[in-house]
Structure formats: C-alpha cells, structure tokens
C-alpha cells in the first residue's frame, strides 16, 4: 500500500520534473543560442590567424602570446584593472553613507529611497555619459564655472582621460554598490550596535568593529559586481576616456572594427572573461568565510 | 540656586544638592515618553537601590522595555531626568553611562569569538591585554563556561549564548545590569536553570540588576522588588510577597498569580462578607467597604465535603474540575452565581472531594478586598 503510494509520488514528481523541463526550454534555447554558442565561437576564433581581415584555418597561440608578452598589452591590462579598482573603491566609499541612510529609514520610506537610487539605471548609459561630458568637458560646467570665477586660465582636462572615465564609471555603477551594501546593512540586528554602544564604543568604533565586518558580504558582492562591470564597460571609457585611452574594451573595439584583427580582439576578450571568472571565484571563497559565523 | 531648588523639588530620592540619596543606584524622575499617540511612559518615578534585583513586570506594550531603554540611553525622553550613581545622565549617550545590557536575542557579535565578545567592552576602554585576559577568564568562570573561550557564538546553544552575553555585560563592572526578557527565547527547563543561575550571579557579582519580563512567576522568583506596570505607569512597586499578598488593586491581583475575584457585600456590623447565593465568610475588613471585590488566592481556600450541619459559614458550590499539578491539586468549584472559585491543596486529589461533589469553601486567612463600583 505504502509502496504503491510512494511509487505514485515518484511518478508525480517525475511528471512535474518533465513539465519543468518543458517550461524551461525557451530559456535554455535562448541561453545556448545567444550566450554559449557565441562564447564558444569567440574562444575558437581567438586561436585562429587572420590576414587582411580574413580568418584563416588552423590553430595558433600567437594571439595570446602577443597579449601576454607584449608590453603594450600589459599596460592596457594593468590600467584597465587599475581604473576598475579605483572605481570600485570610490563606489564603496560613496555607497556606505547612502546605504546606511536607507537601512536606517523606516520601511515605508525605504521603497522610495530604493527607487531614487535605482532611477539613474532607467536612463540609457550613452545618454548619461554624454551628460557627464556636458559637465566635465573642456567647455563643460565645471571648467566654465571655474574660469568665470577666475580660478582657471586653462581649462582642466577632466574628460578624454582617466579622470573622466573614473567619474563616469563611478556614477554609472554606484547604484549596484548601494543596493548591495544596503541588503547587508538591513540584515544586521540593531541590537548588536546598541550592545556595542552600551559597552562603551563610540559611533566610529561601533562602525569599524561591528557594522563594517558584518556588512562585508555586501561590500564584497557589490565590489565584484562593480569591478567586473567596469572591466567590461565600453561606452563610458570610449566617451569619457576617449579613443587614446588604454582600456581593454576600447582596445578590443579597435582591434575588431578598426584593424579588423578579430582573432586578437577575441583573444583579448577571453583574457578579460577569464579575469572576471577568477574574480567571481575569489568572491565565493571570501563570502563563504564571512558567512561561516553568521 | 534656581537649578538646585528645581532639582530638589523633583522627588524624594534627589536631595538638595541634586544627587540622589545614598543607596540609590538609579533614579528616574517624571519620565514621559510617547510614540505617536501611545504613551509608553506616563510620568514614571522609579528608584533602583544599590545591589538590588528589581524587575519591571507587565504585558507587552506596557512600557517596561521603553523605561529600560530610556535608562540605557537608547531612547530619548520627552521629559523627565535619569540619574545613575547620582549623576544626571539624561543627555549622555549610552556609552557614557557605564551600563551592561543583555537582550532576549543574545546579540553576541557573530564575527568574534566568545573571549573577544566578553572582552569587547574592556578593549574599548583600552585596558591592557593581560587585564583583559584575566577579566575574561574570571567572567567565563562566573558563568561556568571557561571551556568555550575560543568558540564562535553560532557554535553555542541558546542557553550558552545567553550566559556569554551576561559575562560580556558584567565584564566592564557596570553600575547597572539591564536584562530585557533574557530568558524569553529558552525552553522551560533551561529557563528554570538559568533563573537559578541569574540569582547566583546577582549575589556573587554584587551588581544592581534591572530585569524586564512578562512572566510573573519569573519576576517573583528572581526579584528583591517587583514593579508591576500597565499602560506606561507603575501600578505597584513592592517586594514579591507583598505584591502577591497585598496587591494594591484588582489589576495587580489578577496579573500576579492565580486568583479568583468575587463580587461580594461587606457587612461590617456582623463581620462577614456575603457572596450572593453562595454563602458568607467571616472576615474583618475596613468598615467603610460595602460593595467589594474579594481577592481569593487558591491556596487560601480550604475545601470540605458538605454535610448536614453546614449551615452557616462558607461558600457552597460543586467541584467542577480536579487537576493534579505535580505536587499540588487545583480544584475548580462552581458557585451558584456562576463564578469559578479556584482552590489549591498540597498533595494528591482528596478521596472525599471528587468531581461533582457538593463542597463548602472557607478561607484560611483574611482576603484582600477592593471597593466595587
């Protein structure tokens, strides 16, 4: 009797399993067609040779060798990672006060604050980035104001370089960091901070000893997100950094669409992809360490 | 001079110099606190004596936790002053009040070991490593858990976490240790065990304890004095025996312990109290009392089987339920007027008082009575 019942249950769950596969099928097809196939194709091309834009048969490691051994590419990679690191750090510093404010707000107000933080994401990145150009450009708001005040003779170079890139990148990716840190802060029991205060700690001490360590999972998750998004960012570096800037995504663009060297462009992309996957792997370990005591 | 006069006029425990009288550890004067339209503290005066175990007892929402949080500095007052060790701390942040606090949810720092938790307050004070190590060891011995030094809070049971929280709170030698329903999350057996432990730790540490609970049994068992609270006011502040035996009003009588409240008439001339339909009880009460509510504790009731010559004293009724409660037996006696009178006697159910038996109830002692509108 019970054997029959359990067999029926097994069959029912198997049926549910089949139904789930059918329901997932469109998504699976999409992912395979639009993600896995192109990535596979990209990896394959990165091992090919080319001649005047034509991809030749046969495999080679030449593309990777030129990237990993050439000083020019080393500089590009280093500066890209450096800029992404600076943007990430700037986001952490700027996001913490905002996240604290949201986490401390009454739940009814929290929804509105979340919306305000996320609202810039509704504006297209290209539009937003041109907006920054209006502020940072040679004839932009800052330079015009400062020269009108007589502070400047020559306009400051705030765009077409790493300054523009970092300012723009920070603004674009800040919401991700804020939302990530807020999630961590909301989860912290207020009584832990109260305990710290009663035990004699001031607000700075409480922040460093209690709030920050417990918010680390959010900081790590947000950092990885911002870091990898910034590594792959293209519009912001191109518009605010300019084509002269050494940035991986800009170099990929130049290789692929200006020099028609698709194998090298894809090889560079694969290097970037591997770097991002590495960062995710490190994040997993770090967060697990912090979650061990939660 | 004006300031001195003003302070002096604020209440008994604060003398003309502005300092509370000797032996008073914490003094709250005229505390008012509103949250929107609810009044959490309605002009409360409270003195906590040096070294005593004082409990704020009341249902949730009566303002007991708010009063504690005001003393801790975690809530601001709308008006009133708080003195700790004779010092006006009303406008000081929690960290400058030298207090200890234990929450129901343990609230240990999850990212620190047990030893780091217990030593946290000492590290903040900037004590030397050796001093911190010694104190942590002493505190862990006080709560009988020295072997847990290097564990994380997540590796401890609820009871262990709460004892570590206690050790952490006592490590800084606070003027006052506050405990906000610290045993509420534990099961009954563990709660009993920790109650005994709390009593011992209170005795051994010599610290003044302020305890908050809604559990009246716990309050009576632990405390030197109990403040019964309702709607932002202290209804009665007394030692446990007086709280139980001499409640000041029906609310306190009903809230603390088992009780039967009986509507009755007092006949001062005859020296009896008459419960309509049930009978009369000889009793000496304030002659001014006429219509009264009689507060009858179950252990004050003596039941006897009804027999032929029972005409005069006692309330007549029928045993409706007999419940054996590990060592005592609780009888419910239905009176003719419909009231259910509770009676408790030591030992097993008596053979001559079975369910359905006609009985006569008398009181071993005079009961407390309140005027009835």
Image: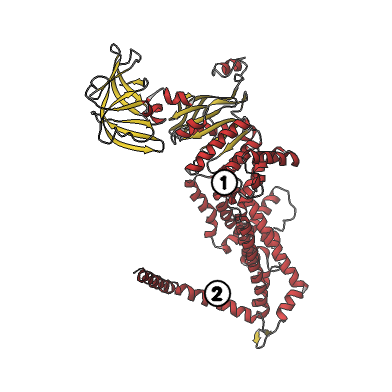
Q: Which residue is drawn at 49% across and 47% down?
A: A107
Q: In this view, does A131 lie above or below B128?
A: below
A261 or A226: nearer the eye? A226
Q: Residue drawn at (72%, 48%), measured in percent from left and top?
A: A150
Residue B310 x %, y %: 24, 22
Comparing B157 with A221, the one in front is B157
- Dividing the picture into quarters, in which one does residue B115 lie? top right
Q: Give the chain of mark 2.
A: A
Is residue A59 among what the camera can see? yes
Using a 10 Å C-alpha cutoff, classify the residue at mark 2 as few (fewer than 14 neighbours), some (14 to 19) or many (20 or more).
few
Q: Quadrant of the N terminus of chain B?
A: top right
The chain identifier of the residue carrying mark 1 reads: A
Tell me what residue is drawn at x 65 percent, y 74 percent: A270
Residue nearest the observer in this picture, B49 or B62: B49
Q: Which residue lies furthest to the top in this view?
A: B269
B234 horizontally vs B94: left or right: left
Apparent side of residue A143 relative to residue B192 in the rendered image (left or right): right
Q: State the image coordinates of residue B229 (x, y, percent, origin top left).
A: 45, 29
| Residue that mark 2 sits on | A35
Residue B206's place in the image compared with A99, above or below, is above
**Residue sitting farthest toward the right:** A71
Residue B206 position (above or below residue A216) = above
| Colouring chosen for the image of the structure | secondary structure
Q: Position of residue B137 (x, y in %)?
A: 69, 41
> Tag 1, which secondary structure?
helix
Residue at the disc numbered 1:
A101
Nearest the viewer among A136 and B97 is B97
Q: Residue furthest bottom?
A: A57
């Amino acid at each position: 009797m019970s054997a029959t019942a359990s067999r029926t249950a097994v069959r029912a769950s198997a049926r549910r399993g089949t139904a789930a596969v059918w329901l997932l099928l469109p998504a699976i097809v999409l992912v395979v067609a639009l993600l896995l196939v192109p990535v596979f194709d990209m990896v394959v091309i990165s091992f090919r040779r080319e001649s005047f834009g034509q991809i030749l048969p046969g495999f080679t490691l030449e593309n990777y060798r030129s990237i990993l051994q050439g000083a020019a590419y080393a500089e590009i990679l280093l500066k890209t990672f450096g800029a992404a690191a600076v943007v990430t750090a700037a986001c952490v510093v700027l996001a913490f006060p905002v996240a604290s404010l949201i986490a401390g707000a009454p739940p009814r107000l929290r929804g509105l604050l979340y919306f305000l933080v996320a609202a810039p994401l509704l504006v297209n990145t290209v539009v937003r980035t041109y907006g920054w150009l209006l502020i940072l450009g040679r004839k932009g708001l800052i330079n015009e104001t400062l020269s009108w005040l007589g502070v400047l003779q020559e306009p400051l170079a705030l765009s077409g370089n790493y300054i523009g890139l970092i300012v723009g990148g920070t603004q674009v990716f800040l919401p991700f960091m804020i939302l990530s840190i807020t999630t961590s802060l909301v989860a912290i029991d207020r009584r832990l901070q109260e305990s710290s205060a009663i035990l004699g700690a001031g607000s700075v001490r409480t922040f460093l000893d209690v709030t920050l360590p417990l918010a680390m999972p959010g900081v790590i998750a947000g950092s990885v997100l911002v870091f990898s998004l910034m590594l792959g960012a293209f519009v912001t570096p191109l518009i605010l950094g300019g084509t002269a800037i050494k940035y991986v995504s800009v170099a990929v663009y130049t290789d692929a669409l200006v020099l028609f060297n698709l194998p090298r462009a894809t090889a560079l992309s694969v290097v970037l992809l591997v770097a991002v996957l590495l960062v995710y792997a490190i994040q997993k370990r770090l967060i697990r360490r912090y979650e061990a005591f939660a | 001079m004006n300031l001195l006069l003003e302070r002096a006029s604020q209440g008994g425990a604060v003398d003309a110099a502005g300092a509370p009288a000797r032996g008073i550890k914490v003094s709250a004067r005229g505390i008012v606190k509103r949250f929107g339209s609810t009044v959490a503290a309605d002009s409360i005066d409270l003195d906590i004596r040096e070294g005593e175990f004082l409990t704020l007892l009341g249902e949730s929402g009566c303002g007991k936790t708010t009063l504690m949080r005001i003393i801790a500095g975690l809530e601001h007052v709308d008006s009133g002053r708080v003195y700790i060790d004779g010092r006006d701390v009303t406008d000081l942040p929690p960290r400058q009040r030298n207090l200890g606090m234990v929450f129901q949810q343990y609230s240990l720092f999850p990212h620190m070991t047990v030893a780091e938790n217990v030593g946290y307050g000492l590290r903040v004070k900037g004590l030397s490593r050796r001093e911190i190590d010694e104190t942590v060891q002493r505190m862990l011995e006080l709560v009988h858990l020295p072997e847990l030094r290097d564990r994380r809070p997540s590796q401890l049971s609820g009871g262990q976490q709460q004892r570590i929280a206690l050790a952490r709170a006592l490590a800084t030698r606070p003027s006052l240790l506050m405990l906000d329903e610290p045993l509420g999350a534990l099961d009954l057996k563990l709660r009993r065990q920790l109650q005994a432990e709390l009593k011992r730790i209170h005795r051994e540490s010599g610290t003044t304890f302020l305890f908050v609970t809604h559990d009246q049994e716990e309050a009576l068992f632990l405390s030197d004095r109990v403040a019964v609270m309702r709607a932002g006011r202290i209804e009665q502040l007394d030692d446990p025996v007086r709280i139980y035996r001499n409640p000041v009003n029906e609310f306190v009588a009903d809230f603390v312990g088992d009780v039967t409240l009986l509507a009755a008439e007092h006949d001062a001339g005859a020296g009896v109290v008459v419960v309509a339909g049930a009978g009369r009880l000889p009793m000496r009460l304030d002659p001014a009392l006429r219509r009264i509510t009689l507060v009858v504790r179950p252990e004050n009731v003596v039941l006897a089987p009804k027999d032929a010559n029972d005409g005069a004293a006692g309330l007549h009724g029928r045993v409706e339920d007999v419940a054996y409660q590990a060592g005592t037996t609780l009888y419910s006696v239905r009176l003719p007027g419909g009231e259910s009178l509770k009676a408790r006697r030591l030992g097993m159910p008596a053979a001559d008082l079975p369910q359905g038996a006609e009985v006569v109830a008398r009181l071993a002692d005079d009961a407390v009575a309140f005027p009835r509108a």
